[in-house]
Image (cartoon, rainbow, N blue to C red):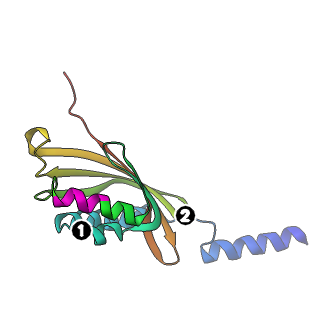
Amino acid sequence: MVGLRRARESAVCVARGYGLGVNRDRAREVAAELAAGLADAWNHHDMPAFAGLFHDDAAFVNVAGAYLHGRGEIERTHAAAHDGLFRDSNLTAWPQDARSVGPDVIIAHVRSELRGDDRAPGGVRQAIMTLVIERRGSQWKIVTAHNTNVLAAHG
């Protein structure tokens, strides 16, 4: 009797989607929406909108290795950079891959190209960002981001 009850409970959980991750298409769609949102906010130099894509308690490690904790620090640090260094920059971003690792968690790799940063050779800086995206309630937002410059291949 216990085995039958567990089987029924499992069937109910599966039918309701509990304990299942989102499928790859949906994971990629969520990652694409967030990548587009990051690029749009960046290109409008709208750092409240940029930071709004992160949960309040998010962490962000930038390409220089600085650790930013919380939406407020993410917003302030990026706003300062957009007042100077990135004033004329333009970002293009797209998901390279995305997959669910639980019912409310997606891990994605987002590629990007940044133009308008004079420090970048040839005027284009390429990067790859690892995102941990978490659904809280009905909202998918970034909980962790780690951005890394992609260096040109040698030889």
What's under tag 2, amino acid-wise?
Answer: Gly
- Using residue 99 as the reference point, say whether residue 110 is left or right of it: left
- Using residue 141 as the reference point, say whether residue 137 is left or right of it: right
Viewer-proximal residue among 25 and 134: 134
- Mark 1 / mark 2, whichever is N-terminal: 2
What's the distance in space between the residues labelled 1 and 2, CA to CA? Answer: 28 Å
- Using residue 154 as the reference point, say whether residue 138 is left or right of it: right
Q: How many marks?
A: 2
- Write the residue at 22% across / 29% down: 153
Vertical placement of residue 127 versus 106, above or below: above
Judging by the rendered image, the residue that carries numbered circle 1 is 41
- Write the residue at 81% across / 70% down: 6
Viewer-proximal residue among 4 and 72: 72
**Marks 1 and 2 in Cβ contact (< 8 Å):** no
Labels 1, 2: front one: 1
Q: Which residues are magenta?
A: 77-83
Q: Residues within 10 Å of mark 1 (few under 14, many from 20)?
A: some
- As drawn, the label of residue 21 is 2
Residue 47 colored in magenta in the image = no
